[in-house]
Amino acid sequence: MTALSRAIARPAPVAGFGERSPLHGLERRRIGILDLAAQSVSAVAPAAAATTVVLLVAGVAPGMTVAAIAAAAVLSLGVSRTVAQFARRFAAAGGLYTYTARGLGTRAGLATGAAIVTGYAAVAMFALLGGAYYSTYLLAGLWPALDRPIVAAGAILAQTAIVAFVLVRGIHVSARVALVVEALSVALIVVLLAVLLVHVGPLDVGVVLAVPTTGAEAFAVAAGAVIAVTAFVGFESAATLGVEAVSPLRNVPRAITGTVVISGALYLLAAVTQVAGFDALGADLAASASPVNDLAAAYGLGGWGVVADVGIAASFVACAIGSTTALVRVLFSLSRDGVLPARVGRTHARFGTPSAAVSLALPAIAAVPLLLVGGGVDMRDAMHVTLSVGAAGYIVAYILVCLAAPVFLHRIGESTAGAAIVSALAAVALTAALVAFFIDDTASGGSSLAVVGVLAAVFVVVVVVLRRRHGSDSIGAYDEPVAAQVLGGVPSPRPPYDG
């Protein structure tokens, strides 16, 4: 028997490992890079965002739409590289919440948790509203006399039921459903955009690729970039599947960065097509109810527009799945850290999903869109408010994680000038863009700042109360090797999870 064989047969005891991971209950090491990419891509919902967000950006930054989206792409890439600094070093279900807690401690971690929960929840609401809007838009073409609020409410309930089923059934199901739906939706949109570009003809480069030349235009680009960033938010959600991923330290960063690159390319194609198309028609892009449909009809491609609407509606369903998947894992992590009640951290005995968190989150996510639609609020206005609130939540979380990264890297002795510069620039740019957006939104009569202000006041009180209950290193649990996975591993006593 060789020395290696003897070591394997009678390994030396290695202490310091638990019998269970702090995040036990989730199905560990089950999903690969394709499923991780599906999670991030579905949360981003590029097929839906390529049409809806371009329209919103055009309303904020007329004439500067492509520039604002390009700025948002660069900004999102910087944030993705910063998030990857954490994702390459440990796997967690809490995503940005856990990352910030590891870097800046309890207070900042709780603030990030509140911000990212707001972001995921509000964007899930936006997705339900978007799916209902496009479903109603499609049906109205067949039955003009239909009762739109009732149809919209029915669509919201149907989407919620689909989301609930796939989230409880298992991460494989939710990831694969989202992947298939989003892949087909993106394929439809790309083909339609390419055909439209051919019909539009030669591009007026000065119009399509206009850059700001005055302070007012630069301000508009900054405000538009915040809206455009909402087309990318969710790219980091693959990090919430770190516990369930195969080779998470390699695959999660790849999924995060790849999602930003692919989405950015699609958004630029969509922006160029829509700006050029409406310029050629002499029409106002910001005044359109459905830009892709209007362009398709104008260039004799009305049937394509209907097909695209089906793809966009399906993409919103995928977005709801992806956003809620990430949300419930953050809630699960907050429970395991003792921030939320222990019962929220329970998982499904058969499917290994955070089913308790699903039952907590979904009713609230569905209730808000139903109340808005039932209250007579125009669905486009409701979509704008929920998207703006979601964007604010995401961006605050991104700012905090960018501030946390250099501190974390310095603490573990792996700080580099490049990583510090990227994270600092991203934090400053995000902060400036967020301020510009709120100024612009308030000046135009929007209510986003008021809603965010109320939520922020509530969260400040919550964070202060919770901070008193938790020490500086008591939150931010991440997946750890267990004794059974280590040759000679000896479990150390740990207080059992009481959920």
Image (cartoon, helix red, strand yellow):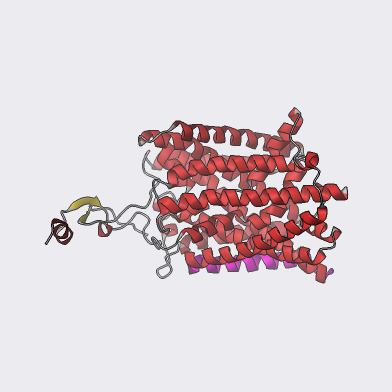
Residue 462 in the image, given as x and y percentages of width and height = 50, 43
Residue at the spot 38% in from the left edge and 38% down from the top edge: 472
> Is most of the magenta stretch helix, strand or loop?
helix
Residue 41 in the image, given as x and y percentages of width and height = 57, 56
Residue 499, compared with residue 162, is above or below; it is: above
Residue at the spot 54% in from the left edge and 51% down from the top edge: 258
**Quadrant including the N terminus:** bottom left
Residue 203, compared with residue 107, is above or below; it is: below
Residue 183 left/right relative to 343: right
Residue 409 left/right relative to 71: left
Residue 222, compared with residue 29, is above or below; it is: above
Residue 165 in the magenta stretch? The answer is yes
**Quadrant including the C terminus:** bottom left
Residue at the spot 51% in from the left edge and 55% down from the top edge: 326
Q: Nearer the viewer, residue 88 or 133?
A: 88
Q: Which residues are magenta?
A: 143-170
Residue 53 in the image, given as x and y percentages of width and height = 70, 50
Q: Nearer the viewer, residue 104 or 331?
A: 104
Q: Nearer the viewer, residue 483 or 492?
A: 483
